[in-house]
Image (cartoon, helix red, strand yellow):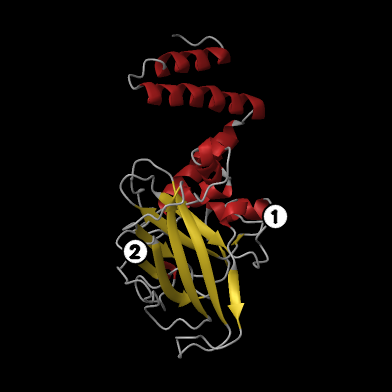
Amino acid sequence: MIIEREQDVTAAALEVMRRTADPRLREIMVSLIKHLHGFVRETKLSEAEFREATAVLAEMGRLTNDTHNEFVLMAGSLGVSSLVCLLNNGDNGNTETDQSLLGPFWRLNSPRVENGGSIVRSDTPGQALFVNGRVLDKAGRPVVNAEVDVWHASPVGLYENQDPDQADMNLRGKFTTDADGRFSFRSVMFVGYPIPTNGVVGRLLKAQSRHPYRPAHLHALIFKPGFKTLISQVYDPADPNIESDAQFGVTRALIGEFVRHDEPHPTAHDVNAPWFSLDHTYHLEAGEAVLPRPPIK
């Protein structure tokens, strides 16, 4: 089509997109053109703004590497990650779900740990945390031999790939649920932390006068054939940023109960008071077990 006016550009692009052989890709691309061209018209995007936008995308690509993913960070900061999660889980967004954001820090091949073991692998000062988890199906039956991958930030708010003072795979571990669907481990109490702000996302937050903090949370990825892979986070309601997560990830179903104990631990005699415990139940939906692509290596 020879373009004669600005409306012709959208018509020509839609004509091409409708030739896409794969039905789902065709649906996505047609909708993308409609909304993207509509956005350009609605905002009256200037040539300078367009050049700046393409430069920002290029910068995000340069910032993404084996230990940092700027695109995942941006998706969360725009609420897209949370929206996709909620639309695809909990009866297509109609009910509560244990599903949550994968985040930019999940790694493959976390070390296997026996139930009751510790995921602390280097000197990590902090108050002891004992986690008891249970994995159930939608009918309330225990899910046996599920693989549970857990990870969280340190008491200073850093994941081990961000912190040269932590050992590789510190505060990460992979467990297997027992005959009752249970798993357990020992760690240290974590805190909320700021997302990386030395890139495009940081500039956006500053321009919007937004803080960069995520409330304290524990990640879990649960894998078992016959069930949809569960990606979850459990948040500490005592965190001061529980209602203003920079990544829009906190839902009511994901708020846990981190109990403080001021008496000695009944069995771990090396633990000083206070210490914390978390008992939490995860629910799996029937579906295909597929591992996501790790955002970092």
Q: Name the residue under label 2.
A: 178
In this view, the residue in front, 96 or 85, is 96
Residue 147 in picture, x, y percent from top left: 33, 58
Residue 133: quadrant of the picture: bottom left
Which residue is more in the foreground, 123 or 228? 228
Above-or-below relation of 15 to 256: above
Q: Is residue 198 left or right of residue 180?
A: right
Give the percent coordinates (x, y) of residue 85. Answer: 50, 43
Q: Which secondary structure, mark 2?
A: loop
Which of labels 2 and 1 is toward the front?
A: 2
Q: What residue type is labelled 2?
A: Asp
- Residue at 66 percent across and 68 percent down: it is 238
Q: What crowding class fits label 1: few (fewer than 14 Cα within 10 Å), some (14-19), or many (20 or more)?
A: few
Q: Is residue 102 left or right of residue 253?
A: left
Q: Which residue lies furthest to the right in this view?
A: 209
Residue 260: x, y in percent?
Answer: 60, 77
Label located before the other in sequence (2 or 1): 2
For residue 165, the mark is: none
Does residue 205 sit above or below 164 in this rendering?
above
Q: Quick check: can you spot residue 197?
A: no
Do callouts 2 and 1 mark residues in contact (Cβ within 8 Å)?
no
Q: Nearer the viewer, residue 139 or 172?
A: 139
Q: Quadrant of the C terminus?
A: bottom left
Residue at left 59%, top 27%? 40
Side of 224 where 160 appears, left or right: right
Q: How many labels does the image show?
A: 2
Q: Distance between the residues labelled 2 and 1?
A: 47 Å
Under circle 1, the secondary element is loop
**What amino acid does circle 1 point to?**
Ser
Q: Name the residue under label 1.
A: 209
Q: In this view, does 199 lie above or below 115?
A: above
